[in-house]
Amino acid sequence: MSDINKLKETASQVRRDIVRMVHAQNSGHPGGSLGCTDFITALYFEIMNHEPDNFDMDGNNQDLFFLSNGHLSALWYSVLARSGYFKTEELSTFRTLNSRLQGHPTTKEGLPGVRVASGSLGQGLSVACGAALTKKLNNDSKLVFTLHGDGELQEGQIWEAAMFAAQHKIDNLIATVDYNGKQIDGPVDEIISLGNLKAKWESFGWQVLEMNGNDMDDVVKTINHAKTLTGKGTPILIIMKTEMGMGVDFMMGTHKWHGSAPNDEQLESALSQLEETLGDY
């Protein structure tokens, strides 16, 4: 049985890491990172079958995760460190020269947990399809998970990959879209509306679930339900409703914190709203 309270405590610490990392370099993307914290925390600490102490690029007999919207790197780095892929002290090197923790995840630095460079939006679903097909060819029963931004769905490659996945019955793939309704230039509906997103993905041949990405109970319940739907010939998509900047009141309800860093005073305000549960790095 899931320890939801423990997951919530971990998520609170991850949110503290995010705002501190972005503040330290006056650079990064806190809004979406805070919004998706519950989801990635649940994946790594509850859902996925993975081995932090035995990382390799192949990931045979382990569940894999690909962060397609790579600008959420502060979130991913924090979760990777907190789940044991590398020491939490390394979080202090975020976005510094020669660090393994670059602004967008890369592979040449050899950071455990990262299997593909990301940040060029639209590519992650194609990568995930390849990884999932590889697992099927190798008779590997583990799953592939991805995360995408709603603004990222304006990239055509996403829909090419969506057609490919349905055509080839890639049913060991669970993709999630962070549907916060905001992108760097403003509301998604004002930039390029996504229309009826559920109907659109269903028309592409996917089975679609919906969840509240800021309700840890719902996150765990929905992803576990999605796992029961795998292996039945259809890729799975989760439409995840979140609030950009979740947990920090002045960052919520606006797209302006998509890629802006808090100043000293704002950092203190943010930290006062987020409980320190595992110890700051």
Image: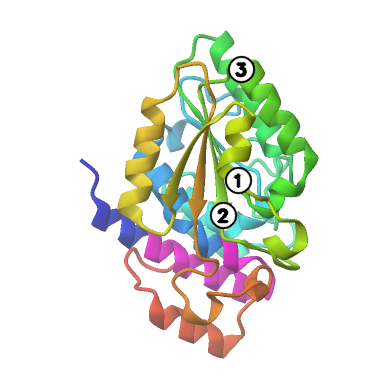
Q: Secondary structure at mark 1?
A: helix
Q: Are marks 2 and 1 in contact (CB under 8 Å)?
A: yes
Residue type, mark 2 in image: Tyr
Q: Which residue is depicted at the point 61% across and 36% down?
A: 201
Residue sitting at 59 percent across and 67 percent down? 30
Q: CA distance from mark 2 to mark 1?
A: 10 Å
Indicate the position of residue 165 as horizontal and vertical percent values: 64, 23
Q: Earlier in the sequence, mark 3 or mark 1?
A: 3
Residue 281 part of the magenta segment: no
**Picture quadrant of residue 29:** bottom right
- Tell whether 26 sits left or right of 270: right
Nearer-N-terminus badge (2/1): 2
Which amino acid type is marked by label 3?
A: Leu
Q: Amino acid at mark 1?
A: Leu
Residue identifier under label 1: 197
Depicted 62 relative to depicted 25: above or below: above
Q: Residues within 10 Å of mark 1 (few under 14, many from 20)?
A: some
- Residues tagged 3 and 2 counted as in contact (Cβ below 8 A): no
Q: Disc 2 marks which residue? A: 179
Compare residues 238 and 126 and report the one nearer the observer.
238
* Residue 76's disc number: none
Residue 86 in sight: no
Q: Is residue 24 left or right of residue 210?
A: right
Q: Quadrant of the C terminus?
A: bottom left
Residue interval drawn in magenta: 11-32
Q: Quadrant of the N terminus?
A: top left
Which of the labelled discs sits on residue 133, or is there none? 3
